Amino acid sequence: MAEKKEIKIGLLGCGQIGTGLIQLLQRQSKFIEKRTGLRLKICRVLVRDPVKSRQGGINRKLLTTNAENILRNQEIDIVVEVLGGVTAPRRLILDALKSGKHVVTANKAVLAEHGPEIMQMAYHCRKQVHYEASVCAGIPIIRSIREGLLANKIDLLMGILNGTTNYILTRMAEQGQSFAEALKEAQQKGFAEPDPALDISGMDTAHKLAILSTLTFGTRLRIKDIYVEGISQIDLEDIKNAEEFGLVVKLLAIGRLVDNKLDLRVHPTMIPKTHPLASVRQEFNAVYLHGDAVGPMMFTGKGAGPLPTASALLSDIIDLASSLSANRQDILTIENIYWGNKKIVPISRTKSEYYLRFPIIDKPGIIGKITTTLGRYGISLSGATARLAPERFGLGHVRVITRDALESDIRRAISEINRFHIMRGKAVAIRIED
Ligand code: NDP
Ligand code: HSE
């Protein structure tokens, strides 16, 4: 049995996730002490509004609106940051490290935007930064890549990394729910970001892809290295069409080594119903990866919500507390983190199969006109069909599935077709992965 030790925690933020952490710690503290000998104690909690009503039996005496009460408190060993946003968390994390505290965070935005600066500061201050909760909430994916798969060169990483958008797409496909209704539910269940535009726009997924790709490919990334498209353009029409073609629409993050360069992107993607990621529903996330020794592998679990996130935060806290209790210094050098130096493939040079939908006014010869134009840009097809729109007489959609095509060719062809008089809206293009 390890020596008993009390580790004191300062919590920055007490919203969905901070409250979840307090509740989980209350529930498991005896169990954790029995298993590890560690007593974990939250000493102060930073909030904006100290009089707001809060769930979960929080001791109001712990609340403070002054971060200095945590950062300058000599007794606090670990600062847990669950504020949301970037500016204040960046400053507080850097200040916490400078004040001699170790840091645990669930904040992917701050890590994706300021990871190198934070890691440099942690190294300089000889402190640890843990961030398991920042990607896929309950799935221990960071630890798995960083420790369990160290013997592998990973060449592909493909995942559903956002619970909110996966929940919305599942509800639209299975219940025929509207986008707005499904988003509201995801917010009520505590899956969405404080600013849900981050979920919908694909940026939250991009932040997580940046974190996973840094670990997997060892490359220092800027968020603009990742091509990002969100799900706001996804229509029930496309979800139904996908179903007809034996496909499912998912918001995928893809990190892939192509000729020793990195292809990094986030976009709605159609995948076959038989693909392992197709059955990942609701707020569940999954990461599918391929290592040269281990082969293909998939991790899945709840990717959003207070308790799954608290599970990851608490395991980071226990890990960190154990190393402090054992007087272990698990300090990473910058070279340990950024060991690769890959160039990025621009999106225009990437290739993919595509589902294309052209909303049209029904006239004879339309399919021919569209497919001939695609052919002029070197785009081969594996199928093209037209369907009349049920809602209004004389309107329809031409639906096309392409073979592998260069992104720049697809864009040029679509831009030409969008100018045709028979078009009654913009073409929709969704990449297909198998
Ligand atoms: P909430 O908006 O619910 O909570 C934020 C908390 O931080 C609130 O308690 C708020 O105070 C406090 N706060 C925010 N800014 C300040 C500030 N400048 N000074 C003092 N207090 C501040 O956010 P969530 O709990 O949903 O998210 C927190 C973090 O966890 C985010 O980074 C998010 O990306 C991440 N995360 C979320 C997951 C999820 O499933 N929702 C999963 C994984 C990570 P007050 O209560 O007074 O308003
Ligand atoms: N808003 C995020 C999501 C929370 O829906 O996945 C988990 O990081």
Image (spheres, grey):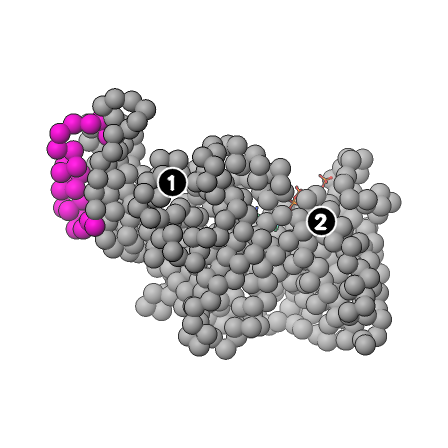
Q: Residue at x 52, y 75 (%)?
A: 150
Outermost residue on the right side: it is 61
Q: How many numbered discs sit on the rendered protein?
A: 2
Label 2 and label 1: CA atoms lie apart by 34 Å
Q: Is residue 76 visible?
A: no
From the viewer's perspective, is 234 left or right of 171?
left
Q: Residue at x 57, y 40 (%)?
A: 186
Whether residue 398 appears in magenta in the rendering, the answer is: no
**In this rendering, is residue 263 above or below 409?**
below
Amino acid at dot 1: Ile
- With 202 as the anchor, is 53 left or right in this view? right
Q: Quadrant of the N terminus?
A: bottom right
Confirm whether residue 155 shows in the render: yes
Instruction: Please give the residue where the numbered disc 2 appears in the rendered image.
Output: 20
Neighbourhood count class around disc 1 (C-alpha, 10 Å): few under 14, some 14–19, many 20 upward = many
Please tell me how crowded label 2 is: few (under 14), some (14-19), or many (20+) other residues with Cα within 10 Å. many
- Give the residues drawn in magenta, as a range: 360-382
The local secondary structure at tag 1 comes to: helix
In front of the other: 425 or 63:
425
The residue that mark 1 highlights is 239
Residue situated in front as seen by the camera: 157 or 329: 157
Q: Residue 172: x percent and y percent? A: 46, 38
User: Is residue 213 depicted above or below 242 in this figure?
Assistant: below
| Residue drawn at (52%, 39%) of the image | 197
The amino acid at mark 2 is Gly
Q: Position of residue 117 (x, y in %)?
A: 59, 60
Ligand 1: give its quadrant. top right
Image quadrant in which the C terminus is located? bottom left
Helix, strand or loop for disc 2? helix
Left or right of residue 329: residue 26: right
The location of residue 236, given as percent across then percent down, is 39, 35
Q: Is mark 2 within 8 Å of ligand 1?
A: yes
